[in-house]
Image: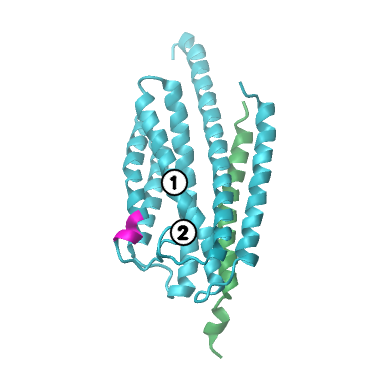
Amino acid sequence: MQTRSTYKPLTILWLLATFAVLAIGFRQAIYIAPTEATMGDLQRIFYYHVPNAMLALIFPYINLAGALGYLYYRSRNPQRAAAADALALAAAEITVILASITLITGMLWARPVWGIWWTWDERLTTFLLLWLLYVSYLMLRRLSSSGQTHGLAAVLSVFAAVDVPITYMSIRWWRTQHPAPVLTGDGNLDPHMYAAFLWNIAGWAMFTTFLLVFRYALERRRQRKAEAFALNFLEEGVPRGY
Amino acid sequence: MDIEILSRLHPIGYVLIAYSVVWVLLFGYALWILSQWRKSKP
């Protein structure tokens, strides 16, 4: 079994590697990548916007896996159900942050390039819907006090995950104002720009993986604390007649 | 003088604001987890 003394150096090593990759990504994005012919320096927003948008479409599936795990285990193995639920919560919070980043950086790019902050284009609308779905998932968990909260949240996450492929395919299915896919489609990316994209994808993927593990560990710790509190209450409360 | 010229941000300004949003949100979240981690010590 792993001990705390093994985890700490591994975490520090992971974070050092992450910051090194992010520093290279920043240098590539600002100083090394060539300036785009039509958009100029504004195109450099893409080096942060695209990796975070890609991750915002991956984390909902981790949330879905956690939700399905919770629904499967809740009547079979409460410990595994609690672990799956903690994973779902961690992934949902990171999804909301990544989707917020995608929407804000997208608007910061759109204002000078399109002349508007927002348009009800299919990609933007489905992405906003994605953000709203995961915010509502977190609100449901936070505000509902019924014993069914975790089950209801898991069902909501199954429906929310349906929006992910629609968001991903929106720029392929419909003629949208949003630019074509940069890395996998007709975005005509200059080969000199690939390094900036790839370093930033790697760096933000490493950092969000760290966040996922850290947030999961926090939630598991809270669950164990709540469980110990409940057991303590039962042990002390029952003789007193509660 | 066209006041629009003064209010128009330099393109690299938009880039730096966008990058700051990413750093602040993701690192702010990491710091929040760290603070909750310390509070929830058994």
Q: Is residue A127 left or right of residue B36?
A: left
Judged from this view, the residue extending furthest toward the front is: A191
Camera-side residue: A144 or A115? Answer: A115
Q: In the image, is residue A172 part of the stretch drawn in magenta?
A: yes
> Do we see residue A42 in this rendering?
yes
The residue marked by circle 2 belongs to what chain? A
Q: Position of residue A123 (x, y in %)?
A: 36, 60
Camera-side residue: A190 or A101? Answer: A190
Chain letter for the cyan part: A
Q: Is residue B22 left or right of residue A17?
A: left
Task: Report which colour depicts chain B.
Answer: green
Which residue position holds label 2?
Answer: A183
Can you tell which quarter of the image residue A186 is in?
bottom left
Q: Residue at x 56, y 32 (%)?
A: A217
**Magenta span of residues:** A169-173
Q: Position of residue A113 (x, y in %)?
A: 46, 74
Q: In the image, is residue A22 part of the stretch drawn in magenta?
A: no
